[in-house]
Image (spheres, coloured by chain):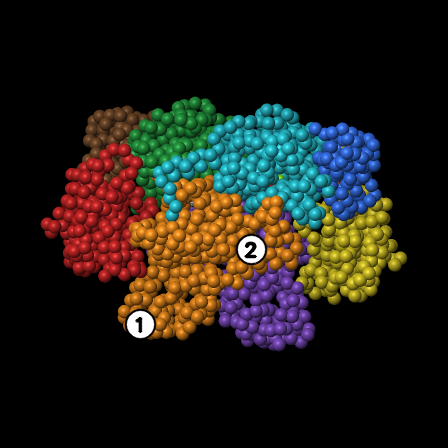
Chain colours: A red, B yellow, C green, D cyan, E orange, F purple, G brown, H blue
Amino acid sequence: MRLEVRFAGFGGQGVITAGRLLALIIMEADPSLYVVYSPSYGFQTRGGDTLSDVIISHEEIDYPKVRRIDLAVMLTQQAYNKYCGLVKDDGLIVIDEHVNKDKGTCGNKRHYKLGIVASARQIGSDAYASTIMLGASINYLGNTEPLKGRLMLEHARQVVIRYFKETLLGRKVGIEDLINKNIKALEIGYEMMKIK
Amino acid sequence: MRLEVRFAGFGGQGVITAGRLLALIIMEADPSLYVVYSPSYGFQTRGGDTLSDVIISHEEIDYPKVRRIDLAVMLTQQAYNKYCGLVKDDGLIVIDEHVNKDKGTCGNKRHYKLGIVASARQIGSDAYASTIMLGASINYLGNTEPLKGRLMLEHARQVVIRYFKETLLGRKVGIEDLINKNIKALEIGYEMMKIK
Amino acid sequence: MNPLIQNYLRSEYAQGKRRTIFCPGCGNGIILGYFVRAIDELKREDGFDDSKLYIVTGIGCSGNIPVPLKYNIIRALHGRALSVATGVKLVRPDSEVVVFAGDGDLLSIGGNHLIHTIRRNVGIKVILVNNMLYGMTGGQVAPTTPMEAITHTTPYGNPEPPLDACKLAVSLGATYVARWVVPLAKQCIQSIKELLLHRGFGLLECLSQCPVYQGRYVIGIDRPSKIMDYYLKITVVSDKPSYGDKITIGKFVDYERPTYEEIMWSIVNKAREGGNYEA
Amino acid sequence: MNPLIQNYLRSEYAQGKRRTIFCPGCGNGIILGYFVRAIDELKREDGFDDSKLYIVTGIGCSGNIPVPLKYNIIRALHGRALSVATGVKLVRPDSEVVVFAGDGDLLSIGGNHLIHTIRRNVGIKVILVNNMLYGMTGGQVAPTTPMEAITHTTPYGNPEPPLDACKLAVSLGATYVARWVVPLAKQCIQSIKELLLHRGFGLLECLSQCPVYQGRYVIGIDRPSKIMDYYLKITVVSDKPSYGDKITIGKFVDYERPTYEEIMWSIVNKAREGGNYEA
Amino acid sequence: MGKYSLMMGSEALVRGAIYAGIRFYAGYPITPATEVAEYMAQLLPRAGGIFVQTEDELAAINMAIGASVAKWKAMVATSGPGFSLMQEGIGHAINTEVPLLIVDVQRGGPSTGQPTMPSQQDVFQARYGSHGSYEIIVLSPGNVQELFYLTIDAVNLSEQYRTPVILLTEEITAHLWEKIYVPGPGEYPVLPHATPPTRGDEGFLLESQLHDERGYNVANDPELSAKALWRLIRKIRDNVDKISRIEVKYFDDEPSVFIASYGCSARSALAAVKMLRQDGYKVGFLRLITLWPFPENTIRNAVRGASTVVVPEMNSGYIVNEFRLLGLNVVSVPKLGGEMPMPEEVYSIVKGVLS
Amino acid sequence: MGKYSLMMGSEALVRGAIYAGIRFYAGYPITPATEVAEYMAQLLPRAGGIFVQTEDELAAINMAIGASVAKWKAMVATSGPGFSLMQEGIGHAINTEVPLLIVDVQRGGPSTGQPTMPSQQDVFQARYGSHGSYEIIVLSPGNVQELFYLTIDAVNLSEQYRTPVILLTEEITAHLWEKIYVPGPGEYPVLPHATPPTRGDEGFLLESQLHDERGYNVANDPELSAKALWRLIRKIRDNVDKISRIEVKYFDDEPSVFIASYGCSARSALAAVKMLRQDGYKVGFLRLITLWPFPENTIRNAVRGASTVVVPEMNSGYIVNEFRLLGLNVVSVPKLGGEMPMPEEVYSIVKGVLS
Amino acid sequence: MRRRSIVVKIDVDKYLCKGCYICVDKCPTKVFEVSSVIGDYGIFLPEARHVDRCVDCGICELYCPDYAITIIRSGGNEA
Amino acid sequence: MRRRSIVVKIDVDKYLCKGCYICVDKCPTKVFEVSSVIGDYGIFLPEARHVDRCVDCGICELYCPDYAITIIRSGGNEA
Ligand SMILES: Cc1ncc(C[n+]2csc(CCOP(=O)(O)OP(=O)(O)O)c2C)c(N)n1
Ligand SMILES: Cc1ncc(C[n+]2csc(CCOP(=O)(O)OP(=O)(O)O)c2C)c(N)n1
Ligand code: SF4
Ligand code: SF4
Ligand code: SF4
Ligand code: SF4
Ligand code: SF4
Ligand code: SF4
Ligand SMILES: [Mg+2]
Ligand SMILES: [Mg+2]
């Protein structure tokens, strides 16, 4: 079993965080799994496109980069155009509402359109797209064969809380609020996927 | 034909100059000959031992360092002890008066003792040892088979004059005197060897 | 695209196929604009000949400032812009050699070349973009970072007192030294013009915002315009360099002494009096 | 062999199997003697603990000064003595770290480390032996060589104005800066003692004769004692550094500010308050 | 005692180094090695150690030398351009026998090259980049877990042989996050730090010219110099088999062809071997853990039957030469541009070789 | 037109460089390359050129780059420690295609090593010393006369291929005085200087990251980067046979054994061959004039019959590996300590091989 | 000297603007507002909604780090 | 403080002396002269011919770059 997940979008949309959290959640959900997480690096993260990949496997992971993606969550048209081709024929493409589906190469793959960015803004900032994406992904992955019955929303909740507590250490105000909003975003994302 | 000559002594005795002049004189005497000149290099030239080697050949010179010396002129005991062993059995060892001949390894080689340092001081400075050595060497080498009839004192005179004119260029006083004394030293050296 | 700037861009930039690599609100882009305007004004006012420009850059975000321009651009190794520029200036004493370098590039890894270039009075014009840290590599401490500041490599506070580049330059005998700050557009442009017309070594230090790292971590402000305001708060015009809680800005020195290239060429002429040597 | 000095030599030197590599009459040997005497006096007067000495040297004739001594000696690469010394001082803040370096070593290739070491105020004591050129490599121009001087690499005269190391150090905030000259034995020894007792970065520049190259080529005097006299002629005691036709000598600054090692160790302590990390 | 964590390669390296007893870090920021510095800046003081951001890479390696000589295990980390600047210092540490860990997180070169892209282009520079004749130990970790352990091994080797050791990794491994096991204290062996020996009340003498074992300069004596230098070379050469390690897989059925690689590109190689095996091709897998000294004998013994080796690497074809010296048929698969070789690429090349 | 003189190697080098059109020299004094600087300081201004003594070697190579880009053929000369410091700059010149002459007068290493003693220890550093993948041209003159001509050849090659070229000589050759012939003006070919191309009213862009042919940065694009870098590598690799030269002697009677060497040690080798021939042994002689790119084909063709090569060199055995790659039986004769191999030494080793 | 011309339009290049909002914050007469149009960098573009308030100080153009702003004046564009 | 002792001899180490003659030139009472004895470096050694003129200023010892000079005093050598 090898599952490949890619999150892609603009810098500032939390694409990097989503990947890292997913990797941590998988470790929490099933400690026997191997996990590789690889965010994009360098100057490109400062403006323009950003992506982060998570690979999950029950054996040691050799090639650490994605080749055939099982789940791709893409928040921008640019990202979609660039990466949809890498998604497996039986994989899932999740795109933000505003993104146009490809007529050509990717048109016949499975697509879900979710209002990720809009919801994030409703919660208060584009950055919540991160945990929304994550929630949606947890839901989807938790229903795929290898993770079924092992990956639960609860794992995600715990990890997200722990993660923000640790990374925001030292910050004086608003931690509670931030965590709550992220949990809410997580749940919203989870629900979005349910509806599909 | 390959002739190897070594001058050795303390820094300040003109050992380096003697070698360079000899090389130039050989070139003057017989332009068809190959000449390599190699003075000692580095910190050791500033205090303590100094040497300079000249190799003369009628074919291209491969190995450029001395191995079996034809003529060695050595002004100090240290130099003598160190290098007399490198002189060919049919070579010539010239040492300054004050240097003691080796009882052991070198004792059966041909030795000449010349009053080089004393004469130099008489002329006015230890540095004249340089041209005295040179004169003696010209005489000896001009009588060896390969250079016989080709290497003359006159060549040496011309080169020495030219050399000092060039290297002392810019110096304001005493050039005439210096050149005259060096020519005198050259002749004294030449004579010393004649007597032997 | 602004047509004034477009006029000065090399083709892929002018055609919009390439854009600057700077983060949103970075001072580097603003300085690029100032530089173009200074040249543009000089060309109109003084008939400045910009075809004799050679621009040498350091490595760092700021080293990318002149890259879009259609001048001769030499990207030097990190820290070595002044050496490359000296090479250019010596063989082309009539050219105008400008160096763009960051505070890390010029003062940290390149510090030795700075001392000696100033001492020699090489006729190079340096625009030092001081964002008080290393932007390109992601927000590490620089020799200009305030003491105790938190950066990615000083999580417990910067242990080192900062260096005042202008003070150092003045003490070494630099013949033109000024410091301004990005929000002071007019002063920056004027100073660039003076620099370009100066004879001998000149340094213009330009305090510039790096919203992404300096803004967020060192100052604690991330709105670019607010960092610009912050800069105006911590600076004060003076005729003496000082780099403490208040940083002084202004023109600190402007005089002339023989340049390195002049002396070198007089040596060449002197040597040739004694007879040419042509191999 | 002088028994006082012999006492301080490592075995092969003490036994006379090895001798210093300096040319006859070189100031380096004299400075070696001064250094030993300063330590000897300090041991008697202050109970100075010379077992805590680390001596780091540059490459150059002057870098060989402490080699015969039986202390911990680290021969650094050319120009890097201050870096090595900073490493030592940081991990052994209680040790006494002394650097011997030539003017080429410290001011030319090592210039960048000098700036930053002074800025940080690392508690290193530098003895700069200024013979106004490169001795080791055979008499080339140095950043300290007077302008227009003839050296092996400036046959048409030195095109560069010299650097005043003391002035530079003072302007960068060095906490002890003095310049003396080899013939002033007492002042040199006294200054070495002060240096060794100083807290923070200290620089003693010692003008020293190189009879072989500086004497012969730059000054035009080759008798060592006469070069010493010449030095007395061109120097004058003052409280401000200046390096022109007359070179000022004297103690220029002597004060205290927090040292780099102190700040670094306070960071370690602060960091550990938040919990140790032992892998 | 230990525990599992999701960790970036750079953090694993840093934790490995601190585990190994490193207490001094000097470095100058450079992509993609900056994260090593940043984790160090964070963690080292908490371990009682000192982190310095130096004015340049020359200062970094020389400060580390000072710290190592005076008291503590020390390290530096850099990438291409900084690695070039450190070469003089590396040779100096070799000659003065200073234990030191030197990390090169490889990016694309030459010059400023490709700062954010991985490569394996410094493989020969690591071996030959400093002037003068010398031998050096260079290790190449294959993944984040190994990055942790090899960092400790590297430090141990540097102490055992009193010599700098180079850990040569790539942007990929340094920036990849993997789940790894971090051992508890005492679980993994760590050697004590070796500072220069002193004699009686004589301090040490660390001479940068060639010197005898007490530090006395012998550079003007050809015989003693030769002796001094051969000693430094032989202490590595004579222990190749002790120092150098490889990993082999799929050799039980004596394949005639194998894929050999190292570092991150070995991951592509392994994926390719698995694909090939799945498709019924008999292909072996060899991974160099030590690049230098090159483990000739160990390799010869391990691959006895095989006659052909395919060598994918992220440079213009470097280590492949060493396999040529073993007398094997060699297929070089050089890769420039900053991407790992794709397993599919390697797969089809090997298929081509097999048919 | 020309004339004969007794000349020190360093002076021959300097005169060769000026003959070749070098008009800018930047350098930092270092034994045993200082004489090159000193002769330059003397002669270059008289040739209308500029000599600079820089603050260090980093400044030297970068100033030379600036001068070469802006107008004049430029060079630097150094030895081991300085050569290490110049490595970053060498890679930079390669990547930005700046013609440059780089001279390394080899002394003993590593570190400060043996400053006044010759060696051939930088043979691999010259090839691999900078980070990143690249190819470079390295020439090794055998005597003072050749030092003169190869300096010109090196400058010509650097202009032709728009790349730095390294002239790798040794303390011995640089300090030896030999009678040489110095050609008159126009007697020996000299190429014009290549500065970076500009387009229309657009100035040039010399980018230090990987770039396309107009200078635009392509470092983030794996495909374009690979293309850019392969182009730099191929312009040398594809011209090996045009670039690289050897000298062969005593191959007429098809000896099965030959001695191969380069630089000053080839003089010992030749002396040994002569001794062996005198004593009736059939032994060939091969001298590498170009070290890199290694002239594989040329050598294969030249030595066709021979199966064994004895390789004396003044290092721990470096270039000998390249002969191993040719599939020859190889006897390495490494020599450390600062003395040339004695012809007698080589003689007896070859005799051992022959019996 | 700038001729007395009237600013008729202020153009923001949607491809170049990175959304730093320096123009929005620094315009002395608050000519700019953040729109809801997304530019090429994924940010909401500023828009010169109140050109009528423009005093032609030129600061928006001068400060824009990405040469995205062009002040268009009646009587031709003579920036 | 130096005890009032009398200089009885000034030793020049023939193995160490490099013949710089700083001692000869700098001794305020001209105690030294150049002898005709050749030292280990091939130079004529200085000799303290006039110890009776020595004022025990110590400068010869201090200045000697090669620690070749030892002032020997009655009442022991307490340099
Ligand atoms: C030899 C070397 N070391 C390190 C680097 C990495 N590096 C690139 S830019 C930079 C510093 C950038 O800081 P600064 O000069 O202040 O420019 P900024 O990005 O802040 O404008 C560093 C360390 C390099 N390219 N080369
Ligand atoms: C990297 C490097 N470059 C050059 C040298 C050669 N070198 C040795 S000492 C020296 C300069 C010596 O001058 P200075 O520091 O003034 O010391 P001095 O000999 O005058 O006491 C130089 C250039 C070297 N050893 N290493
Ligand atoms: S990192 Fe900072 S300095 Fe660099 S481009 Fe971004 S904002 Fe500007
Ligand atoms: S060269 Fe000069 S500085 Fe060096 S030892 Fe000789 S006299 Fe002293
Ligand atoms: S200043 Fe320029 S880049 Fe910034 S928001 Fe305004 S138009 Fe966009
Ligand atoms: S020109 Fe001035 S007033 Fe007009 S929009 Fe721009 S900043 Fe505002
Ligand atoms: S000072 Fe010392 S070295 Fe010099 S002559 Fe006198 S005894 Fe000899
Ligand atoms: S102690 Fe003084 S007086 Fe006596 S010999 Fe020495 S220098 Fe002369
Ligand atoms: Mg900066
Ligand atoms: Mg000096």
- Residue drawn at (22%, 53%), measured in percent from left and top? A29
Q: Residue at x 49, y 50 (%)?
A: E193
Give the labeled residue for mark 1. Answer: E281
Closest to the observer, C266 or B105: B105
Residue A38, image x, y percentages: 29, 51
In the rendered structure, which amino acid carries the disc numbered 1?
Answer: Tyr
User: For the N terminus of chain G, which image quadrant?
Assistant: top left
Label total for image: 2
Q: Is mark 2 within 8 Å of ligand 2?
A: no
Residue F87 seen in this snapshot:
no
The percent coordinates of residue H63 (x first, y second) are: 71, 35
Q: Nearer the viewer, residue H48 or E220?
A: H48
Q: Where's residue A25, x and y in %?
A: 23, 50
* Nearer-the-camera pick, D160 or B67: B67
Mark 2 vs mark 1: same chain? yes
Disc 2 marks a residue whose amino acid type is Gly
Instruction: Give the residue displayed 32% in from the left and 70% down from the top.
Output: E351
Which residue in the protein does label 2 denote? E132
Please indicate whether residue B71 sits to the left or right of residue C14 in the image: right
The C terminus of chain G - image quarter:
top left
**Secondary structure under the numbered disc 1 in the rendered image:** loop
Ligand number 8: quarter of image: top right
